[in-house]
Amino acid sequence: PLIEFFVYPSFSQMNKDFGFDMHPFYQSVSVGGRQIAANRMVFYGGAKAEANIHEIIHILLRQITPAPTMLEEGICTYYGGSIGKSYEEQKAGLIRYLENNPKEPINIFDFPEDYGYNHSYTVMAVLVEYIEKQWGVERVLEMLKFEAKEKGGDEEVFRNMIKTYFELEESEFASFLRKILDIN
């Protein structure tokens, strides 16, 4: 089946026309996308729409897992960027943020706003890159399926995933992330 791809010159117009601005998790940014996996529809508003494959990857991953997960956001960001920026740009922004905030605890569910960067998704993308380099893409898919089957809220599922696959407690995650990003 085909994936329908709707392109808008602005994110705000896209949100208004399709009612996404009424969603409880709506974020006001200048560029970005949305998708409706069940209908295989992708929406993108802003510059470089043709380069946005993040939302398309979400739809493709629905063939593997029934529900979105944080690791899925990492996969989509790693391979497709986020908020109009490539993974490399997002990763550089995350590194800058962490270097400028060395004592800041890392809670991937509650990063302070940093316009143009989605640090939560980028942290997950960094994990995807690490996992793929260490163990291969099969391990990424295994972890994605694990996370999709876990019960509980996003934060609890994430804690279970890092404990199961990395043998880390939540309190150890910030040090682990800084280590794999080569940040002192």
Image (cartoon, helix red, strand yellow):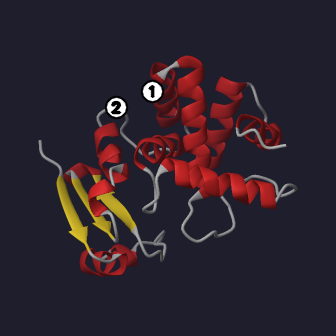
Q: Is residue 45 above or below residue 133?
A: below
**In what element is the residue under mark 2?**
loop
Say whether residue 108 is visible. Answer: no
Q: Quick one: label 1 or label 2, which is nearer the N terminus?
A: 2
What is the number of the mark on residue 64?
2
Q: Nearer the viewer, residue 127 or 161?
A: 127
Residue 34, horizontal then vertical, whole percent: 34, 61
Residue 104, horizontal then vertical, whole percent: 83, 58
Q: Quadrant of the N terminus?
A: top left
What residue is at 32 percent from the left and 55 percent from the top? 51
Say whether residue 95 is visible. Answer: yes
**In what element is the residue under mark 1?**
helix
Residue 123, horizontal then vertical, whole percent: 62, 46
Q: Is residue 50 above or below residue 173?
A: below
Q: Quadrant of the C terminus?
A: top right
What residue is at 52 percent from the left and 40 percent from the top? 71
Mark 2 closeness class: few <14, some 14–19, many ≥20 residues within 10 Å: few
Residue 26, horizontal then vertical, whole percent: 45, 72
What is the number of the mark on residue 141?
1
What is the number of the mark on residue 83?
none
What residue is at 45 percent from the left and 62 percent from the top? 83
Q: Which amino acid does the dot numbered 2 rest on?
A: Ile
Residue mark closest to the camera, 1 vs 2: 1
- Residue 42 picture quarter: bottom left
Tag 1 and tag 2, C-beta contact below 8 Å: yes
